[in-house]
Image: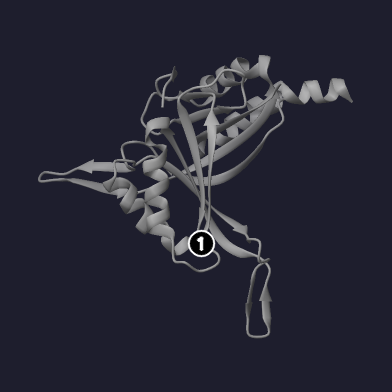
Amino acid sequence: MAQKLQNLSRMVEILSVVRKEMAIPLKEKLYEKGIYFHSWHVKGRGKEGGLKYKGFLREKTMMAFLPKEAFSIFVDEDKTQEIINTIIETVHTGSYGDGKIFVFNKKEGTNMKMIKAIIRPEKLYDLISALEKAGFKALTTWDVIGRGKEGGVQVGERSYNELVKTMVLIGVEDKDKDKVVDVITKVCNTGVYGDGKIFVCDISEVWTIRTKRREL
């Protein structure tokens, strides 16, 4: 049992968000190497704020979000760099939108945080607008199902044990953490049960796939 606990303490999580069209090649490569993972569809954008088109008079946003695929991989800490290299080599195109790689739970840390917010779906675009105004354009989002301590809601005689929610993922410098949390709280608070939760996690490493560098 002690040995099992020791091994678990050396596990890290690698979370990578990549182009949707590169998901199948990455899955094939991970299968080939015997690396276990789970993946799901998400929408995301980087610091550019989506796909832009520079017109004659002004810049236009053609797509606020791009289709992406998220991969979650748990590995021994000493295998971390090998997995990172595999992801980058497989999905790198050199263009904006290649994605990010986040590493959690390594012994070494950084001055970066991952903010995970579970919010009401109808609040998403208000939140995006407020975050943009505050200088935070990069985020990833997907639909989830959840409930709080109340166990759902009761509408008349009908009970809803699970409610549709939206997950929002934002990586920030530690100095910006409170600012982002404040924006989310102000925009998404209604004062009614079901507003959601905000979780803040330490990030051990961040890689930008386009540049192949450790950077946010």
- Looking at this view, is 185 or 50 the one in front? 185
User: Quadrant location of the C terminus?
Assistant: top left
* Residue at the (62%, 59%) spot, across then down: 146
| SS for dot 1 | loop
Residue denoted by label 1: 195
Where residue 95 appears, as percent x and y from the top left, is: 37, 28
Around disc 1, counting alpha carbons within 10 Å, would you say few (fewer than 14), some (14 to 19), or many (20 or more)?
some
- Looking at this view, is 44 or 4 the one in front? 4
Q: Is residue 81 left or right of residue 58?
A: right
Where residue 72 appears, as percent x and y from the top left, is: 63, 35
Q: Quadrant of residue 24?
A: top right
* Residue at the (68%, 76%) spot, across then down: 159
Q: Residue furthest bottom?
A: 156
Q: Amino acid at mark 1?
A: Asp
Q: Is residue 39 left or right of residue 122?
A: right
Q: How many marks?
A: 1
Q: Is residue 184 left or right of residue 135?
A: right
Where residue 26 appears, as percent x and y from the top left, is: 59, 29
Q: Quadrant of residue 30?
A: top right
* Residue at the (60%, 35%) spot, across then down: 71
In the displayed structure, 144 sits above or below 4; it is: below
- Looking at this view, is 76 or 182 the one in front? 182
